[in-house]
Amino acid sequence: MGAERRWLFTLFSAAMASLFLVLLFSIYAFSSFGGTFPTPIHHGPHHPPSFAYYISGSRGDRSQIFRLFLAVYHPRNRYLLHLGAEASDDERMALAAQVAAVPAVRSFGNADVTWKPSRLTHMGASDIASILRAASVLLKVDSGWDWFITLGASDYPLITQDGKPSFGLSQSDLIFGLLIFCDVWSK
């Protein structure tokens, strides 16, 4: 019985030591992974271009703005989301919370929600002023972008470049083109 006890004690001790080491390494791995991702995003002429997006909307457009943001999101780009003065502060805070909940945004820190809203009208000087103000804010925050793109909540859903050919020519467009071709050919 003495040899069996020693063998069981050795086996039990080895199992406990292995379990302790596995737990220690898993805690270390999870704590070191909890930080931000390394962000080796380089800007300049020898690297792909980066974009600055200004996505705006009005009261009730929070979900469209967020879906549009997710549709165009890329870590290289910079984003400024704007809900107009008609939207409530609660709606603005909910949009900011949605954006902050995206893991990539937390890691790269490349999206902001404006807290000083301006009245949005899609005509005249106020629209131009809000776009210029957004470009100014984006330049102050990060000047590493190459192109500035403005989008509105009504731009969702976007049609990707892969989807455009299927929507490019409808049956009526083809018939119209055929009739014009036949008319020109007959003359």
Image: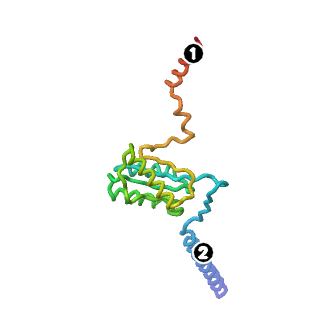
Task: Name the side, left or right, on which 120 lies relative to 182.
Answer: left
For the point 45% across and 58% down, which residue is it? 99
For the point 33% across and 59% down, which residue is it? 90
Residue corresponding to mark 2: 25
Residue corresponding to mark 1: 184
- Depth check: give the residue in front, 131 or 180: 131
- The three-letter code of the residue at mark 2 reads Phe
Q: Which of marks 2 and 1 is in front?
A: 1
Report x, y in % for residue 31.
Answer: 55, 72
Label 2 or label 1, whichever comes before in sequence order: 2
Task: Name the side, left or right, on which 86 lies relative to 142.
Answer: left
- Depth check: give the residue in front, 71 or 28: 71
SS assignment at label 1: helix
Crowding at label 1, few (<14), some or many (≥20) Cα neighbours within 10 Å? few
- What distance separates the C-alpha of mark 2 from that of mark 1? 78 Å
Q: Is residue 53 above or below residue 172?
A: below
- The three-letter code of the residue at mark 1 reads Val
- Depth check: give the residue in front, 157 or 5: 157
The quarter of the picture where residue 18 lies is bottom right
The quarter of the picture where residue 37 lies is bottom right
For the point 46% across and 59% down, which residue is it? 112
SS assignment at label 2: helix
Q: Is residue 50 above or below residue 183?
A: below
Is residue 54 visible from the viewing direction of this image? Answer: yes
